[in-house]
Image: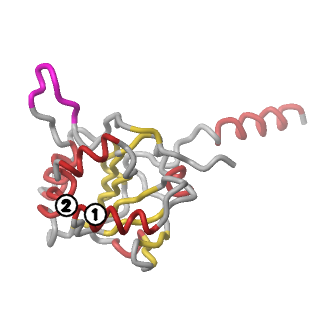
């Protein structure tokens, strides 16, 4: 009986340390509402590559990417190539009006989804934004991490990890850099 108790305690502790999203495995499905009230299921995009971009309009790093037009341009480059781009806002104090405003300011051609409870972000282990995920047509995670490398010093131009992962995947190759560490702002989860 004592061994059974130890096993149970071990499994309880271990189960909380297993990441929700792992490279090479199926991603958790979700249903969210976009900025225009349409219900979006991740499973609707089975058979296509899906880029998930976590963003927060108040994050300086996110603002820089949008002011430099890097996110929008990359999404536009892959339109019509069986690639779907979904941006998710998990900032607890925002709402769909904030997403609509962001979409209008930057003329975004992709859907902005509201996850203001942070539930989906937590299931995907999102801690820092911008944070990117690339899912293959079978629903398997093939890239997670930063949008691009930091620049400065000897890096005069950042390396775009998402673009590289998309190019390799679309060419039928494995992603050579499947995971990086994102840097930016912490996700602002609700306090409850």
Say if mark 1 contacts mark 2, CB within 8 Å.
Answer: yes
Q: Is residue 188 above or below residue 90?
A: above
Q: Residue 41 appears at what percent x and percent y? A: 44, 73
Residue segment shown in magenta: 149-156
Residue 37 in the figure: left or right of residue 49: right
Q: Say whether residue 154 is magenta.
A: yes
Where is mark 2, residue-wise? 75
The quarter in which the N terminus is drawn is: top right
- Residues 35 and 13: in front is 35
- Residues 177 and 94: in front is 94
- Name which residue lies at 42% across and 52% down: 25
- Name which residue lies at 49% across and 53% down: 91
Q: Residue 11 appears at what percent x and percent y? A: 70, 39
- Name which residue lies at 16% across and 68% down: 79
- Regarding residue 76, the answer to whether it shows in the image is yes
Q: Residue 8 appears at what percent x and percent y? A: 78, 39
Snapshot quadrant of residue 37: bottom left
- Regarding residue 55, the answer to whether it shows in the image is no
The residue positioned farthest toward the top in the image shown: 153
Where is mark 1, residue-wise? 85
């Amino acid at each position: 009986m004592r061994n059974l108790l130890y096993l149970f305690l071990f499994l309880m502790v271990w189960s909380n340390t297993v990441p929700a999203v792992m490279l090479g495995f199926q991603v958790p499905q979700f249903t969210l509402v976009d900025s225009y009230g349409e219900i979006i299921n991740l499973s609707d995009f089975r058979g296509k590559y899906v880029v998930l971009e976590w963003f927060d309009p108040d994050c300086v790093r996110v603002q820089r990417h949008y002011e430099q037009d890097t996110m929008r341009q990359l999404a536009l480059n892959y339109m019509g190539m069986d690639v779907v781009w979904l941006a998710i806002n998990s900032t607890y104090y925002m709402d769909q009006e904030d997403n609509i405003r962001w979409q209008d300011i930057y003329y975004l051609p992709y859907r902005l989804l509201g996850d203001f409870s942070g539930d989906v972000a937590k299931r995907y282990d999102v801690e820092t934004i911008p944070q990117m995920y690339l899912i293959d047509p079978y629903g398997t995670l093939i890239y997670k991490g930063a949008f691009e490398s930091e620049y400065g010093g000897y890096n005069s131009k950042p390396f775009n990890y998402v673009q590289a992962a998309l190019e390799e995947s679309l060419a039928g190759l494995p992603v050579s850099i499947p995971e990086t560490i994102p840097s930016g702002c912490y996700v602002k989860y609700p306090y409850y």
